[in-house]
Amino acid sequence: MRPSQVLKRLNELRKVYREQTFKFTSEQQKEYDNLKEVRRERVKYFYDNDLVFKGAAKKLDKPKAKTP
């Protein structure tokens, strides 16, 4: 299953969860747990391979104020 399909299916299951008074059937729960695990593995892969944006680099040099 492609990553985009995983996210779409997770969102569909969340919607169903709300519609079913916040309860999953056993099949839905198994599918949801499986999809969450697949997603977590994907995210872990990105972190392990430094493919995650970690913010802009901090600039260490401060500009000096002009003296009159």
Image (cartoon, grey):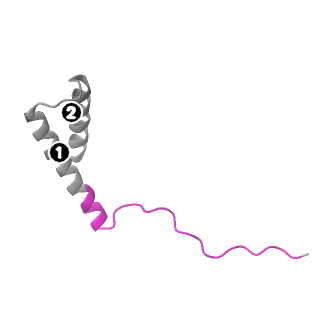
Residue at 23% over, 47% down: 3
Residue 31 position within the rendered picture, expressed as x and y whole percent measured from the top left? 12, 40
Task: Report if the CB atoms under discs 1 and 2 are less than 8 Å apart.
Answer: yes
Three-letter code for the amino acid on which mark 2 is drawn: Leu
Is residue 1 in sight in this rendering?
Answer: no
Determine whether 61 is above or below 28 in the image.
below
Residue 10 position within the rendered picture, expressed as x and y whole percent measured from the top left? 23, 38
Determine whether 68 is above or below 4 in the image.
below
Circle 1 residues within 10 Å: few <14, some 14–19, many ≥20:
some
Is residue 47 in sight in this rendering?
Answer: yes
Q: Is the magenta stretch mostly helix, strand or loop?
A: loop
Of all residues, the one furthest to the right in this rendering is 68
Residue at 72% over, 73% down: 63
Q: Would you say 53 lies left or right of 64 here?
A: left
The answer to which of marks 1 and 2 sits earlier in the sequence is 2
- Which image quadrant for residue 7? top left
Three-letter code for the amino acid on which mark 1 is drawn: Leu
Q: How many marks?
A: 2
Q: What element carries label 2?
A: helix
Which residue is identified by label 2? 13
Q: Would you say 50 lies left or right of 33 here?
A: right
Residue 58 position within the rendered picture, expressed as x and y whole percent measured from the top left? 55, 69
Quadrant where the N terminus sits is top left
> Camera-side residue: 3 or 31?
31
Residue 26 position within the rendered picture, expressed as x and y whole percent measured from the top left? 8, 34
Q: Which mark is residue 35?
A: 1
Q: Residue 21 carries which label?
A: none
Magenta stretch, residue numbers: 43-67
